[in-house]
């Protein structure tokens, strides 16, 4: 190490000093990798947020992911956790009902009926259209009686 700069030069560095420098570089690289990984985990959690003029919606799954990153039980301190879960369940149910409704509204096939409900008369195989309608009725909690 030179006295004027306080730095090692190639002709003055000892093996011990070089080992210490390599250990420092390894330690700093490890810290940088951990920091990049943590940032990536936060980015994956935050990308689920919905930000609008009305406010910010933070999904339950996002809070859970951030809690895992920080090692903190964020959800234990959320008073309205059941509300978040119900909202997510309601959103999923609405999406299913919309898909069923879109199918029913867009159906362009011929009308049909079966001797055995839900089975084709010719070979007894399941009727996909009837199965889809049954799923839609179940999603809407409608009774099946009196319907094709």
Image: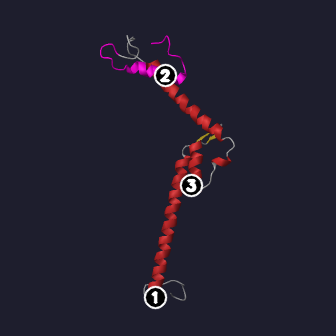
Q: Residue at x 48, y 75 (%)?
A: 23
Q: Which residues are magenta?
A: 120-148
Quadrant of image for the C terminus: top left
Residue at the disc numbered 2 = 136
Of mark 3 and mark 1, the one earlier in the sequence is 1
* Closer to us: 133 or 119: 119
Residue at the disc numbered 1 = 12
**In this figure, which colouring scheme has been used for the structure?**
secondary structure
Q: Position of residue 128 (x, y in %)?
A: 38, 21
Q: Position of residue 77 (x, y in %)?
A: 68, 48
Closer to the eye: label 3 or 1: 3
Looking at the image, is 63 positioned above or below residue 135? below
Answer few, some or many: residues within 10 Å of disc 3's Cα (few below 14, many 20 plus, some between 14 and 19).
some
Residues at marks 3 and 1 touching, judged by CB atoms closer than 8 Å: no
Residues at marks 3 and 2 touching, judged by CB atoms closer than 8 Å: no
Q: Residue at x 55, y 28 (%)?
A: 94
Q: Quadrant of residue 92?
A: top right
Q: Residue at x 61, y 35 (%)?
A: 87
Q: Of the numbered discs in the image, which one, if any, rests on residue 69?
A: 3
Q: Residue at x 49, y 66 (%)?
A: 30
Q: Position of residue 79 (x, y in %)?
A: 69, 43
Q: Quadrant of residue 5?
A: bottom right
Looking at the image, is 106 positioned above or below residue 49? above
Does the stretch in magenta take in 138?
yes
Of mark 2 and mark 1, the one earlier in the sequence is 1
């Amino acid at each position: 190490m030179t006295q004027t700069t306080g730095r090692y030069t190639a002709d003055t560095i000892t093996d011990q000093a070089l080992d210490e420098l390599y250990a420092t570089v390894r330690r700093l690289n490890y810290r940088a990798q951990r920091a990049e990984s943590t940032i990536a985990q936060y980015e994956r959690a935050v990308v689920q947020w919905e930000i609008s003029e009305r406010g910010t919606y933070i999904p339950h799954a996002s809070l859970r992911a951030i809690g895992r990153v920080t090692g903190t039980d964020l959800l234990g301190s959320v008073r309205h956790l059941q509300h978040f879960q119900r909202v997510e369940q309601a959103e999923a149910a609405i999406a299913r009902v919309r898909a069923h409704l879109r199918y029913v509204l867009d159906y362009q096939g011929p009308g049909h009926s079966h001797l055995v409900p839900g089975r084709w008369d010719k070979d007894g195989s399941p009727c996909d259209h009837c199965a889809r309608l049954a799923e839609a009725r179940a999603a809407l909690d409608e009774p099946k009686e009196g319907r094709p």
